[in-house]
Image (cartoon, rainbow, N blue to C red):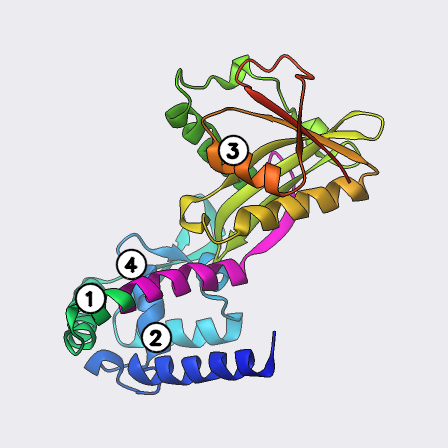
Amino acid sequence: MTSEHIAQVRRFNRLVTQRVGALDDHFLGRDRPLGESRVLFEIGAAGADLRDLRSRLGLDSGYLSRVIRSLESAGLVRLRARPDDERVRRACLTAAGLAEVEEMDRCSDRAAEVMLAALPEPQRQRLVAAMTEVHALLRAAAIQITRVDPASKAARWCVAQYFAELTNRFEKGFDPGQSIPADDAELRPPRGAFLVASVDGESVACGAVKSIAPGVGSLKRMWVAGSLRGIGFGRRMLLALESEASALGLTTLRLETNRALVEAIRLYKSSGYVETAPFNTEPYADHWFEKQL
């Protein structure tokens, strides 16, 4: 990056904070600043655990506690212990809180309409398209990739999304029971690793590697949420998996894939994977690839 890149990011941040009213103690004309309004919105009609709010919004405990106390004093929020775990506190909106969020939504819609109405249609379309791309790229920049236990809730959820996508995309559907398995024990060090990518408390990608022979590993369960595709995150996830493979002492990586996954095939080829003859009996595979690390 260059100094001009940094300067442009700072100019963008200053403009956005001004335009969205982040500097106003009465955000959207309501009786609270942006921070309290955002927490109120994130609690929503379903309510939210405080620990999830901290993770989702990247807030420290002290600040969030002060915000919640302020919203409680205003009669908008109440705290209760979660029925299945009394150690976890859950914030819920009162009737007044629900009404306030509805009004905030109306005010937010009006503010967005005013911003867009100031531009002619071609520029309006450009602005919305640019905002969509910036949103996706900012999410990608904040993503953290970590090794997790394959039996964890996050890993299980990601794999379920992966299987659901294969079911939808494969011509004859997908049955995990018919595919070559990847047992939990195979995806834990020193035999393997399972990675999950998350942002704002949400799991958005996963991938695994397992040893199948001395020095040889197999890539499994690689999935990226649709909202992150097309911006290069799949390659970032693949590089992270290759790094894990090297740390496990693997020097060759193999994978198999279905012809329906054209984006994945394009990624593997551009990342140095070479198509080879079939090296296993995976019933859903049409292509087999290998790469020397």
Q: Earlier in the sequence, mark 3 or mark 4?
A: 4
Above or below: residue 279 compared with residue 162:
above
Q: Are marks 3 and 4 in contact (CB under 8 Å)?
A: no
- Please, what is the three-letter code of the amino acid marked with disc 3? Val
The image's mark for residue 159 is: 3
Q: Earlier in the sequence, mark 4 or mark 2?
A: 2
Q: Earlier in the sequence, mark 4 or mark 1?
A: 4
Q: Secondary structure at mark 3?
A: helix
What residue do we see at 43% from left, 80% from top?
13
Q: Earlier in the sequence, mark 2 or mark 1?
A: 2
Residue under circle 1?
A: 105
- What is the distance, in whole Å, between disc 4 and disc 1 at their CAs? 11 Å
Q: In what quadrant of the picture does the N terminus appear?
A: bottom right
- What is the distance, in whole Å, between disc 4 and disc 2 at their CAs? 13 Å
Q: Earlier in the sequence, mark 2 or mark 3?
A: 2
- What is the distance, in whole Å, between disc 2 and disc 3 at their CAs? 35 Å
Instruction: Quadrant for residue 81, please give it.
Output: bottom left
Left or right of residue 267, residue 261 in this image: left
Residue under circle 2?
A: 36
Location of residue 168 in the rendering, given as x and y in whole percent from the top left corner? 37, 26
- Please, what is the three-letter code of the amino acid marked with disc 4? Gly
Q: Residues within 10 Å of mark 4 (few under 14, many from 20)?
A: some
> Disc 3 or disc 4, which is closer to the eye?
3
- Please, what is the three-letter code of the amino acid marked with disc 1? Asp
Left or right of residue 136, residue 148 in this image: right
- Please, what is the three-letter code of the amino acid marked with disc 2? Glu
Q: Residues within 10 Å of mark 2 (few under 14, many from 20)?
A: some
Q: Are marks 2 and 1 in contact (CB under 8 Å)?
A: no
> Disc 4 or disc 1, which is closer to the eye?
1
What residue do we see at 30% from left, 87% from top?
24
For the magenta stretch, what is the residue range? 127-151
Instruction: Quadrant for residue 185, please give it.
Output: top right
